[in-house]
């Protein structure tokens, strides 16, 4: 069988088109996970601006193009998997979930961080999206342990981790610095065999 020769310009064009498409990581009933791209900056930043009251004081998402660019870079580093939770219906960004500080060897663990956006609060989209991230962590990445640290007064996030089968492991005073203050957190974990 002979090789079919394709002009280089067509190959380059096809590769560029493919690379501009988002990398879908997991798909659920109403949402799917994909990696963030620099092209998402405008939508993402507008969504975070609209969600500022929802996020305060729980999380500080990227607030400008530079910070978003650093997030995109970190989201695909060897020790992290950043995911945008997008609606299957119209591909809008509904939230974010990240696995960070992935440690291999005898630990096989990662931290989970997540936040939704104001237009989609209370619709169960984050529960479905974070559930997909857990499947990604345990089935695809073969992690053993995922830890989520949640501020004690963040009732929405606590309800989410409880609903997804996390177990409270402890309490860490002044654990993370968010919005310029060291804040207490509860440590919640989920194991692959839970």
Image (spheres, helix red, strand yellow):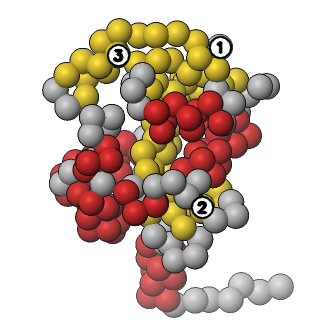
Label 2, on which residue?
32
* Numbered disc 2: secondary structure: strand
Q: Residues within 10 Å of mark 2 (few under 14, many from 20)?
A: many
Nearer the observer, 41 or 190: 190
Q: Quadrant of the C terminus?
A: top right
Q: Is residue 83 visible?
A: yes
Label 3, on which residue?
184
Image quarter for residue 103? top right
Which marked residue is nearer to the observer: mark 1 or mark 2? 2
Q: Residue at x 45, y 84 (%)?
A: 13
Where 118 falls versus 89 (above or below)?
Answer: above
Relative side of 52 to 139, left or right: left
Which marked residue is nearer to the observer: mark 1 or mark 3? 3
Relative side of 21 to 181, left or right: right
Q: Is residue 34 visible?
A: no
Q: Residue at x 50, y 18 (%)?
A: 187
Q: Residue at x 32, y 37 (%)?
A: 59
Q: CA distance from mark 1 to mark 3?
A: 28 Å
């Amino acid at each position: 069988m002979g090789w079919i020769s394709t002009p280089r310009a067509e190959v380059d064009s096809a590769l560029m088109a493919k690379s501009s498409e988002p990398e879908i990581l997991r798909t659920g009933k109403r949402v799917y996970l994909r990696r963030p791209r620099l092209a998402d900056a405008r939508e993402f930043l507008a969504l975070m601006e609209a969600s500022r009251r929802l996020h305060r004081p729980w999380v500080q998402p990227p607030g400008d193009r530079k910070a978003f660019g650093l997030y995109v870079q970190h989201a695909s580093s060897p020790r992290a998997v950043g995911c945008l939770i997008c609606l299957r219906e119209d591909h809008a960004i509904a939230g974010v979930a990240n696995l960070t500080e992935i440690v291999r060897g005898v630990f096989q663990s990662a931290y989970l961080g997540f936040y939704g956006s104001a237009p989609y609060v209370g619709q169960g989209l984050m529960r479905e999206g974070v559930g997909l991230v857990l499947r990604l962590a345990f089935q695809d990445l073969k992690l053993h342990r995922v830890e989520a640290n949640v501020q004690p007064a963040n009732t929405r996030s606590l309800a989410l981790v409880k609903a997804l089968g996390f177990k409270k492991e402890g309490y860490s005073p002044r654990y993370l610095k968010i919005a310029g203050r060291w804040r207490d957190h509860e440590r919640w974990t989920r194991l692959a065999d839970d």
